[in-house]
């Protein structure tokens, strides 16, 4: 494995091995790593940038590669094994940026029923090494989402 220094020269990070040709490939790898509790695969998805952001439901905002890596390591050490079914996916994509809004329907091994859905926004940035995650933000859904887009309430901000 090749290594390179991070931005703050004291940090040494592995060189990315995977190039994700589409944001959808990057997203699929994110959820595969989550279900496998594979820290190295999880961090392969993330951009190596101090401006990356991760927010789990009810948790404080994490920023930067090291904070996010430490947090995923803590989650994976918990031993909980998750199965995630994605639904209500909407994507807005440009040449360099892709924003995905979706619902994560999470089943924890050993629990009888799925937890409340998590409304999630994932943001991907195109780089020289392919697409990488720069934001993962999840919030617990307060109510079930309408089945049809026309059923959405008409609210003007």
Image: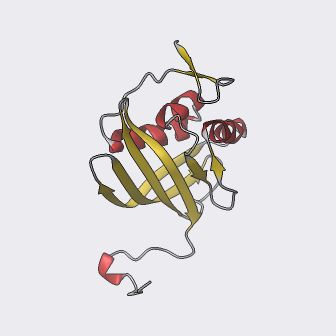
**How many numbered marks appear?**
0
- Compared to residue 4, the image places residue 75 above or below, namely below
Coloring scheme of the render? secondary structure
Residue 110 placement, left or right of 47: right
Farthest residue toward the top?
1
Question: For this rendering, which residue is in front, 141 or 112?
Answer: 141
Which quadrant, please, contains the C terminus?
bottom left
Residue 132, image quadrant: top left
- Compared to residue 146, the image places residue 25 above or below, namely above
Farthest residue toward the left?
95
Residue 124 placement, left or right of 142: left
Position in image of residue 23 (x %, y %)? 35, 43
Residue occupying the point 32% across, 76% down: 149
Position in image of residue 114 (x %, y %)? 57, 59
- Compared to residue 23, the image places residue 152 above or below, namely below
Residue occupying the point 65% across, 49% down: 62
Position in image of residue 72 (x %, y %)? 64, 40
Question: For this rendering, which residue is in front, 21 or 151?
Answer: 21
Residue occupying the point 67% across, 35% down: 73
- Compared to residue 91, the image places residue 45 above or below, namely above
Position in image of residue 13 (x %, y %)? 59, 23
Residue 70, image quadrant: top right
Residue occupying the point 55% across, 16% down: 3
Residue 34 placement, left or right of 93: right
């Amino acid at each position: 494995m090749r290594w390179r220094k991070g931005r703050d020269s004291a940090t040494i990070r592995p060189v990315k091995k995977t190039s994700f040709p589409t944001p959808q490939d990057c997203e699929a790898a994110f959820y595969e790593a989550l279900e496998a509790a594979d820290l190295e695969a999880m961090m392969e998805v993330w951009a190596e940038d101090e401006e990356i952001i991760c927010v789990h439901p009810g948790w404080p905002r994490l920023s930067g590669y090291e904070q996010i890596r430490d947090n995923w390591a803590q989650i994976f050490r918990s031993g909980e094994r998750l199965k995630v079914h994605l639904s209500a996916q909407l994507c807005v994509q440009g040449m360099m940026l892709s924003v995905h809004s979706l619902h994560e329907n999470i089943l924890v091994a050993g629990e009888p029923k799925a937890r409340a859905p998590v409304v999630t926004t994932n943001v991907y940035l195109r780089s020289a090494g392919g697409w990488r995650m720069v934001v993962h933000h999840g919030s617990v859904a307060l109510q079930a989402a309408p089945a049809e887009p026309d059923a959405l309430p008409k609210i003007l901000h």
